[in-house]
Amino acid sequence: MADNAKAAAAHARPESSQEEEEDWKEAEGDVAEVDRAATNGAGEGGVPTDRPIRVYADGIYDLFHFGHAKSLEQAKKSFPNTYLLVGCCNDELTHKFKGRTVMTEDERYESLRHCKWVDEVIPDAPWVVTEEFLDKHNIDFVAHDSLPYADASGAGNDVYEHVKKLGKFKETQRTDGISTSDIIMRIVKDYNEYVMRNLARGYTRKDLGVSYVKEKRLRVNMGLKNLRDRVKQHQEKVGEKWSTVAKLQEEWVENADRWVAGFLEKFEEGCHSMGTAIKERIQERLIKAQSSDFGSLLQYDSYDSDEAKENDEDEDEDELFEDVKE
């Protein structure tokens, strides 16, 4: 195909007129582009088919977080077979065009090397992606979100403008709710608390860049905070005890009637048993007493009978004596 194009261009090469000469040069440039594509094994849309597609993503990657990782994941998965190169700007370039970072350039490079989506890290990456840089690293596409990033170096309004014109830009989506700026704002918001915590850990005010007066004020605040915390803990303990007492009181009130009824029932059973025992003892005593009186009565009756019999015999003897006497 490339040979046919070359032959056609050679056959159509003009021998006069400047306009025709320029047309010929343009056609020759198209042929050269076709040759490069054929050499690289490019398929439809200029996408290589005989090797991994080299995708480039760049940034500062300060305080590396999951938002960075998800954007690199999208870049890595933009093609079935992707080799992901990640460029990271050094401290000098970043401080000049964006501002001071929390992490050093070496820390940022190392964070990227430990991301599983990254195949290669390019340190000292340029602020603006140029065609020379793309050719140097054989980059097929550049992946980034589509927001225009103003070029602070003055080279243009968008650092990816040149890449977008070449048709080598792959858009990725930002992750809402997380960014390096958001994390820094959280730290700034709770700055005093972080300083107090590190002072308590043994850091000096010089280590933290804090003045003498501010250190003393923060230490006083730290003491007051600890005091408030202890008071709060004591109140919570007292509250727990009162809650336990109130719960027991409520339980006692709810069960008081049942407990009283049970007590009275047991007391009544005891009284009834005791009364029954007393009655039985009294009855036993009465029976014993009655048996004793009846025995005495029988003895008395027997004595009276013998005495009457003796009297009758005496009377009979007296009567007989009187009869004989007569």
Image (cartoon, rainbow, N blue to C red):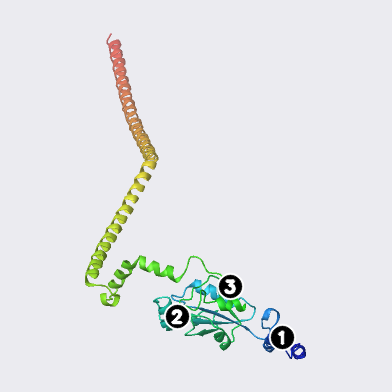
Disc 1 to disc 2, C-alpha distance: 54 Å
Where, quadrant-wise, is the C terminus in this rendering? top left
Count of numbered circles on the image: 3
Query: Is 205 above or below relative to 139?
Result: above
Task: Classify mark 3: residues with Cα within 10 Å, few (<14), some (14-19) or many (20+).
Answer: some
Q: Name the kind of residue labelled 2 in the image.
A: Arg
Q: Earlier in the sequence, mark 3 or mark 1?
A: 1
Q: Are marks 3 and 1 in contact (CB under 8 Å)?
A: no
Helix, strand or loop for disc 3: strand
Q: Name the kind of residue labelled 1 in the image.
A: Glu
Q: Name the kind of residue labelled 3 in the image.
A: Glu
- Residue lying at the far top in this picture: please name it: 326
In this view, the mark in front (3 or 1)? 1
Q: Earlier in the sequence, mark 1 or mark 2?
A: 1
Report which residue position mark 1 lands on.
Answer: 20
Q: Position of residue 180 (x, y in %)?
A: 44, 71
